[in-house]
Amino acid sequence: MVAQGASTTIQRMNELLQPCEYDIAIVGGGAAGVLAALQLLRQAVAMLRIVLVEPQSLLAQGVAYSTRRPEHLLNVPAGGMSAFVEAPDDFVDYLRERRCCPQLADDALPQAFVARLHYGAYLRERLAQAQAASPARLEVLQDRAETLDKHDDALLLQLASGTRIRARALALAVGNALRPLPVRGASGLARAHRIEAWDTEAVAALPPETSVCIVGTGLSMADSVVSLCANAHRGPIHVISRHGLMPLPHAAGPAADFDPAPLLALPLRQRVRQLRRHAREAMRRGLPWQGVMERIRPLGQALWQSLSPDDQRRFLRHVARYWDVHRHRIAAGVHAQLQALRASGQLRVHRARLDTAFPVGACVQVSARTAQGRTLQVDAQQLVNATGVEMRVQSMRNPLLQQLLGRGHAVPGPHGIGVDTAADGSLLDAEDHADPRIRVIGSLRIGRLWESLAVPELRGQAQQAAQALLAGSLPA
């Protein structure tokens, strides 16, 4: 006779051994994963079982939209943030319906840079609406996918909890990973001395008199600085990066009126010259240079893919940071705030290559080498890692990605960035075979597409992936 406790244990073991059956699995519940789930639910015409695996307790809380800080604004106007290609005003409609921005007139919303905290709530509401209206059923598991085994008739996911999932098809949307601090000694620093910029509440909670050193001068740095200022920060803020380039602002105005198509036939050096010429011409006519970037925005992926591999490497080595500050701009008000802090001397930007970071008493002593070859030393009570998104897949510290690479089910993308995919987003394996059952969405496609982080790209990829996965998941 088996004791009741032993019987329960055996039953639980059998449940773990027996995989849960689904038609489609989604790995990742940030913006990319939620957009994929939205499209699957909206496009489904039959009763299908869909599962979304995400370790966070709340969906749409990836790096970009997890912040609850009202000073963190979207980096594009609200009119460009709809979750749906066919309904470009949907996010603006949501803001109006929910009275999210009562200080703004309705007709001002499309061009407004609203708080990012609204966007995750918007995606969750639209997901709930899609669940209620769809014949398909979505189950969300708060868990982490660790391995994926491929069989002829199904894909088998192993989760950290021990749960196993069997599905006919899968959307891989794991989102962004934090780049580690590029400085010797960083791993030995106590947590009391270092903060990740993505831990926005920890940054905002720093005492106002704290001396702060931020590593990186991109969008995460801007978030950190505005959070410090929202807390009436009085201490010095040092910012260090290799190029010392700060984010540039958006500007009102139309896209420039030149034809960008000829750029696709030019090598990198000539392209850069042409873009500079167009920017000078725009400014000569009293127009903002930002209109040139708006004009080439729809061609971002084509511009990358039409470069030779050698020119892509040159771009990554010499141009990428300059491209980023012109392409990924910030709200004009945030830019003005940063400039005012620089003018006052509270914010000090250093162009230098980091060397070491070690604790010295109550401070962290950061040493770097300037472009002129001099040694820069900064003593700060708090070090903030704002180095941004890790693009090298081998460095992402994601167990599922490491297992896929180790098994040959995936390979790094061009230049080691992300994972390699076919033109339709199917995952490529070590033998260059595309598996149409696995569709990659978002930042993992950056090596092939370069432009694969922003909402316009994510929503398009989600729509296409859902259509393909639904077709492939139907019973034979």
Image (cartoon, rainbow, N blue to C red):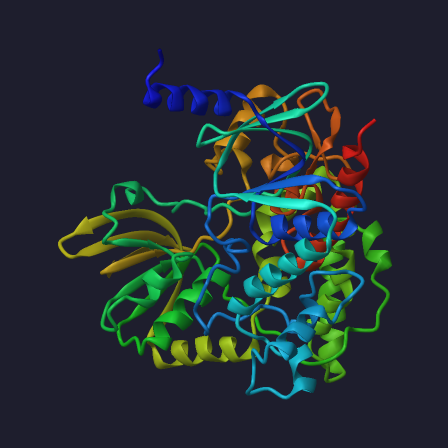
Q: Residue 46: give x, y in percent of width and height.
A: 79, 43
Q: Is residue 291 left or right of residue 228?
A: right
Please state, as top left, top right, bottom left or bottom right, where the C terminus lies in the image.
top right
Residue depicted at 24% across the width and 69% down the height: 207
Against 364, residue 449 (above or below) is above
Which residue is situated farthest in the front direction here? 1
Please state, as top left, top right, bottom left or bottom right, where the N terminus lies in the image.
top left
Q: Residue 228: give x, y in percent of width and height.
A: 35, 71
Q: Nearer the viewer, residue 128 or 306?
A: 128
Residue depicted at 26% across the width and 49% down the height: 191
Q: Nearer the viewer, residue 82 or 235?
A: 82
Q: Residue 203: give x, y in percent of width and height.
A: 34, 63
Corner quadrant of residue 23:
top right
Count of number-bearing discs: 0
Residue depicted at 57% across the width and 75% down the height: 114
Corner quadrant of residue 140:
top right
Corner quadrant of residue 415:
top right
Against 332, residue 315 (above or below) is above
